Amino acid sequence: MRLPGLAELDDLGRTLVMGVVNVTPDSFSDGGEWFEPAAAVAHGRRLRAEGADILDVGGESTRPGAARVPVEDELARVLPVIEALARDGAVVSVDTTRAVVAERAVASGARLVNDVSGGLADPRMAEVVARTGVAYVCMHWRGHADVMDSLEVYDDVVADVRDELAARMVDLRAAGVRAEQIVLDPGLGFSKAGTANWPLLSHLGTLRTLGRPVLVGASRKRFLGHLLAGPDGVLAPPAARDAATAAVSTLAAAAGAWCVRVHAVQATADAVRVVAAWDGARAVDSTAGPVSTQDETVQEAFGDDEGSTT
């Protein structure tokens, strides 16, 4: 699906890779490592060289329990980094829930707004997105970082997230945001601390029925730490979750995700290219006549497109 302002990404023929550039002292994964603007710009350039298609610059941590930062601090953190990376020719996204930060970031060169609140945290966000016309990631969200874990109550997490995102789309459209601007994100880890994330990943096709591209942001999150916990129950630390993140990226790409958002780019950049080559070969095979008995056995073991939930 083509999104406004991202023409150079339209014809890559694969899932996109968004590299995370945290300009924060307290992010759960790499807080403080790239806090100075020069370090953040250098990090963004490295991620781009490793294969990132989009650089997502954020100045406020959304880790569980994080306190909000003053808007002036957020602006001071992200604007110099966005300006420098945009001058390099990078496709830059701003990770913010604040309309004023989104507006200033777009003026500084950002071409995508990645809002983890889906417009719920700031009533002006939809108006800014509509007026600027930029692509907009609308994530499933129920509350700020300091309260989100208490809001993990679902009857059916897949159906509930789909319905809540559909409601957000209705509200955004009513505020003037065009459908073609919207990307949907299931909000892994946000009011979903553990096992609730897996059904969302295994049923990405349910979200895609809403008719918009889907972004998956699983990188280094708690549910992967739980999955990889040691015999003592201690969660695997964030940096030890990169191989699992790459595995999720591969499966998400195979399920048709528009983009995957990651901290460590190289493995995921390779993974999405493997998926594209695999799918391309399958497309060629589908025109080549009946499959062999061996191929039929493989299809029976792993399923085919018709029987897949994604």
Image: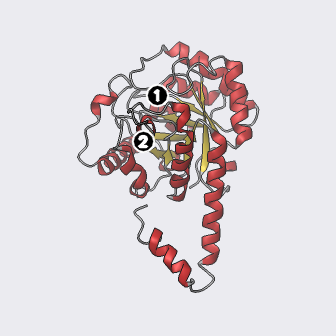
Question: In terms of sequence position, does the residue under pointer 1 or pointer 2 come before the other?
Answer: 1
Q: Is residue 149 left or right of residue 20?
A: left
The residue that appears at 34% across and 34% down in the rendered structure is: 191
Q: Is residue 285 above or below residue 36?
A: below
Q: Residue 144 at x, y = what percent?
A: 37, 26
The residue that appears at 69% across and 36% down in the rendered structure is: 47
Q: Nearer the viewer, residue 209 or 20?
A: 20
Q: Is residue 50 above or below residue 7?
A: above
Q: Is residue 128 above or below residue 305?
A: above
Q: Secondary structure at mark 2?
A: helix
Question: As shown in the figure, which amino acid type bears the numbered disc 2?
Answer: Leu
Give the alpha-carbon distance from disc 1 to disc 2, as whole Å: 29 Å
Number of residues whose C-alpha sits closer than 10 Å to that of mark 2, classed few (under 14), some (14–19) or many (20 or more)? some
Q: Secondary structure at mark 1?
A: loop
Q: Is residue 26 left or right of residue 65?
A: right
Q: Quadrant of residue 138?
A: top left
Q: Is residue 176 visible?
A: no
* Residue 7, numbered circle: none
The residue that appears at 58% across and 49% down in the rendered structure is: 3
Tag 1 residue = 97
Q: Residue 280 at x, y = what percent?
A: 64, 67
Q: How is the image coloured?
A: secondary structure
Q: Nearer the viewer, residue 91 or 218?
A: 218
Q: Is residue 178 left or right of residue 199?
A: right
Q: Nearer the viewer, mark 1 or mark 2?
A: 2
Question: As shown in the figure, which amino acid type bears the numbered disc 1?
Answer: Thr
Q: Quick check: marks 1 and 2 in contact, CB under 8 Å?
A: no
Q: Residue 19 at x, y = what percent?
A: 62, 37
- Quadrant in the picture for the C terminus: bottom left
Tag 2 residue = 227
* Residue at the outermost bottom position: 290
- Quadrant in the picture for the N terminus: bottom right
